[in-house]
Image: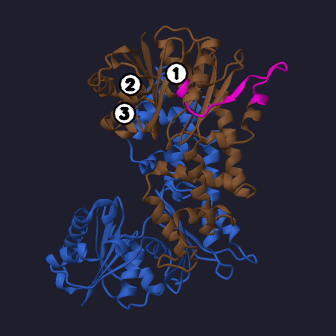
Chain colours: A blue, B brown
């Protein structure tokens, strides 16, 4: 019987699943970053090959029985082609067509088998898609840390850092974010003044922050939630929530209420956002289904089945989710 | 008679002046970027050496008569030491002590001979200093494009780009900034949709903008002023002005009203800011002196004289400014 390989390849971790044509997940593995843009072609391929070997062994399956490979990842296929992963997989005996799908679509299908609706994702970045007939009909945001990604982990973390420094610089009121940022950077709160007429702590924080790649400022996003009750922190979180609602609004059309699938580690910290979205998208008293998902693994499996021509209905979706849950 | 060399070394241009002990400017030259952080040690030194040869020739002066060298530049001396410029100058016969001063202090002394007051500068970056007894007593902002520089050219240009893209992305109202940004990037306003469910023009703008170094977004700051009357553009300009006022407020102390010296190409575009600053800093009906300067050249000369022990009073300052104006 043919099997299918589904890979949810993210920047920091990659989940690999072997699934049969009935939607039964036979093996599951989790490894490091599998996106060739962030991890390099060889690094990404190595993670995916390792995961593939592992799920084949776990399922006691032959590499030659894999009839199709589906990789869900951000933007990679258009820039990189398929050889970087097709060749290494062939090297271990997996000689099957390799298809790519959007990581946002995998998030969507991790929450529903229905072919129409929305996904809103906020991790380090942020974006929303509208799905029609199982395809991405429109994308809003996802413009990256410098130009967009409003409400994302970077967006929040960047504001946390700027707001904390503005406070230390005397340009903004005191905020709990300042000591939290210094703690996170391992810097003592030394208010004595350096040669530039600045506090020593501020000077050290600037130096430490410019040593990071800008996108790494996402690491400070949790401080905004940790400082709940602080005026500046609460404002950042509220503005992030509004920004994410605007992103979803911009991708939405009136005749399609939902489902709305929510993904990403930053979005998961917004306790009240699902309720806000449900109210905003209610029509005639009917509220759309809102569902959080942990990652895109279920969706990658759904997309692998769909790509292979296997219709995914409520029953198959239930088989996928329950058999995968048993493996994780 | 000994002469002094004053160098206002910026990231994009460097102005070199030879001055005598009475404040008479004898030679003036303008060349490319002379800051070793942005132009590299050799590149920066080459510009300054060329300028030095030129002003010596113009004044018919001997290199051996130069009794002191003063370089006004951002942050360079603490990071780079002095050898990168002292050695090449010695190579052309200028064997004199080399001193460094802050570019912000040179801006201050370009507008006044008084030893106390403020400078507020907004070019690509933005910062304010309080000057006491001729020295920098406090600095606010100047934290760089990623962490601060509120109200700067980068700050405005970054918002112009983000606001224009948000509009093209359907997340924000239409704005005149969108067609201006596309024009500036040489991109046709093609609203047809690409494979990611985005407009072709938006996709091309994203690609073009990520090819720039982030700080180069400062290039779009003039669009905010060009689009005056557009709601989004006017908001960006107004917020930049408020941010610069906050920066000045944060460095100010009650007993010192001014003078306030304004510098930098971005600040020069804010027509109403000097008046706002004058009102904000007025006390008991007396308004501080507010003065715009074009660059830090006069101040570099003043600092060269002060470093050499020449007191700069109103008469010497007048000699410096008028003799320099005659050369430029």
Question: x, y percentage for residue A160?
Answer: 54, 43
Label 3: chain? B
Q: Mark 1 points at which residue?
A: B25
Q: How crowded is mark 3: few (under 14 residues within 10 Å), some or many (20 or more)?
A: some
Q: How far apart are marks 1 and 3 (CA)?
A: 18 Å
* Rendered position, A121 above or below B232: below
**Residue A225 appearing in the image:** no
Magenta region includes residue B280: yes
Residue at left offset 46%, top offset 56%? A124
First in residue order: circle 3 vs circle 2: 3
Task: Name the mark nearer the viewer: 2 or 1.
Answer: 1
**Residue B245 appearing in the image:** yes
Relative to A308, B143 lies left or right? right
Q: How far apart are marks 3 and 2 (CA)?
A: 24 Å
Question: x, y percentage for residue B86?
Answer: 31, 23
Task: Name the mark nearer the viewer: 3 or 2.
Answer: 3
Question: x, y percentage for residue A276?
Answer: 67, 62
Magenta range is B278-299
Magenta region includes residue A262: no
Residue at left offset 35%, top offset 71%? A79
Q: Residues within 10 Å of mark 1 (few under 14, many from 20)?
A: many
Q: Residue B78 carries which label?
A: 2
Q: Mark 3 points at which residue?
A: B50
Secondary structure of the residue carrying numbered label 1: strand
Q: How far apart are marks 2 and 1 (CA)?
A: 28 Å
* Foreground of the two, A252 or B193: B193
Residue A279: image quadrant is bottom right
Q: Are marks 2 and 1 on the same chain?
A: yes
Relative to B162, B226 lies left or right? right
Q: Quadrant of the N terminus of chain A?
A: bottom left
């Amino acid at each position: 019987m043919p099997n299918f390989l589904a890979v949810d390849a993210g920047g920091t971790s990659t989940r690999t699943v072997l699934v049969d044509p009935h939607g039964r997940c036979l093996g599951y593995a989790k490894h490091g970053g599998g996106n060739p843009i962030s991890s390099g072609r060889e690094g990404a391929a190595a993670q995916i090959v390792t995961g593939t070997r592992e799920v084949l062994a776990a399922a006691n399956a032959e590499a030659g029985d894999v009839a199709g490979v589906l990789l869900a990842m951000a933007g990679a296929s258009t820039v990189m082609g398929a050889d970087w992963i097709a060749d290494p997989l062939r090297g271990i005996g997996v000689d099957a067509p390799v298809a790519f799908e959007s990581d946002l679509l995998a998030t969507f299908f991790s929450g529903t088998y229905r072919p129409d609706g929305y996904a809103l994702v906020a991790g380090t970045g942020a974006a929303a898609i509208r799905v029609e007939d199982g395809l991405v009909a429109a994308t809003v945001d996802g413009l990256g840390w410098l130009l967009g990604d409003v409400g994302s982990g970077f967006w929040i973390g960047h504001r946390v850092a700027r707001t904390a420094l503005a406070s230390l610089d005397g340009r903004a009121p005191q905020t709990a974010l300042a000591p939290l940022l210094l703690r996170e950077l391992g810097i003592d709160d030394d208010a004595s003044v350096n040669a530039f007429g600045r506090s020593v702590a501020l000077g050290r924080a600037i130096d430490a922050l410019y040593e990071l790649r800008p996108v790494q400022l996402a690491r400070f996003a949790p401080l905004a939630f940790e400082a709940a009750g602080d005026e500046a922190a609460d404002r950042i979180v509220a503005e992030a929530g509004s920004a994410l609602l605007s992103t979803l609004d911009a991708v939405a059309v009136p005749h399609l209420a939902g489902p709305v699938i929510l993904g990403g580690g930053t979005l998961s910290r917004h306790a009240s956002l699902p309720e806000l979205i449900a109210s905003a998208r209610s029509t005639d008293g009917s509220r759309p289904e809102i569902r959080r998902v942990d990652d895109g693994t279920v969706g990658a499996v759904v997309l692998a089945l769909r790509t292979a021509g296997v219709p995914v209905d409520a029953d198959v979706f239930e088989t996928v989710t329950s058999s995968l849950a048993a493996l994780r």
